Image (cartoon, grey):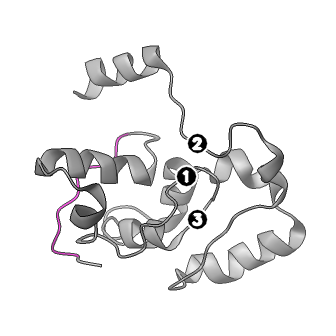
Amino acid sequence: MNNNVELPYLFPNEHLLSVLARWFDLTGRNDFLMTCKKVSSNLTKLTPSAIWRPVFRDLASHYKETMPLEVILKEHTLLPYYRSFLTLTELELFNDELLKLGPSFKLLPKLQQNLKYAHYWRWCKECAHDDYEEYG
């Protein structure tokens, strides 16, 4: 992880991985994985199937001075959507390990794996247009 990289400001309710994609776009390079290794070496499986992965820790560390971790979790991860899929054991692990920003902690709720749309990113064309109009 390189804290010398300057990531863009997080838009309201923007996922952490989205800011990584925007940063990559601004670099003008064409190799996502090689370029993004400047930000995190944990770039495997960047699907929406996990609440937390090591890459999220690396990205969140760039905002820790201006945004509490609790806000990042609530507004910039899929925790609000997947919370109901967490078992009591997973929730306890989440509270114990994630809030410490453990180096390799990953939280992938087992129950949400049954959701058809939990395995790839989707977006609404109108929402993307509205975001472009509002944020550029």
Residue found 35% across the figure and 24% down from its top: 131
Above or below residue 20? Residue 123 is above
Above or below residue 50? Residue 122 is above
Q: Which mark is residue 52?
A: 3
Q: Is residue 121 magenta?
A: no
Which class describes the residues within 10 Å of circle 3: few (<14), some (14-19), or many (20+)?
many
Q: Quadrant of the C terminus?
A: top left
**Which is nearer the N-term, disc 3 or disc 2?**
3
Tell whether 67 sits left or right of 51: left
How far separated are the C-alphas under marks 3 and 1? 11 Å
State the residue lying farthest toward the right: 88
Which class describes the residues within 10 Å of circle 1: few (<14), some (14-19), or many (20+)?
few
Whether label 2 touches label 1, CB < 8 Å: yes
Q: Which residue is mark 1?
A: 47
Residue found 43% across the figure and 42% down from its top: 14
Give x and y (percent) for residue 81: 69, 44
Q: Identify residue type, mark 3.
A: Trp
**Label 1 element class:** loop
Q: Which residue is mark 2?
A: 120
**Range of magenta residues:** 3-11
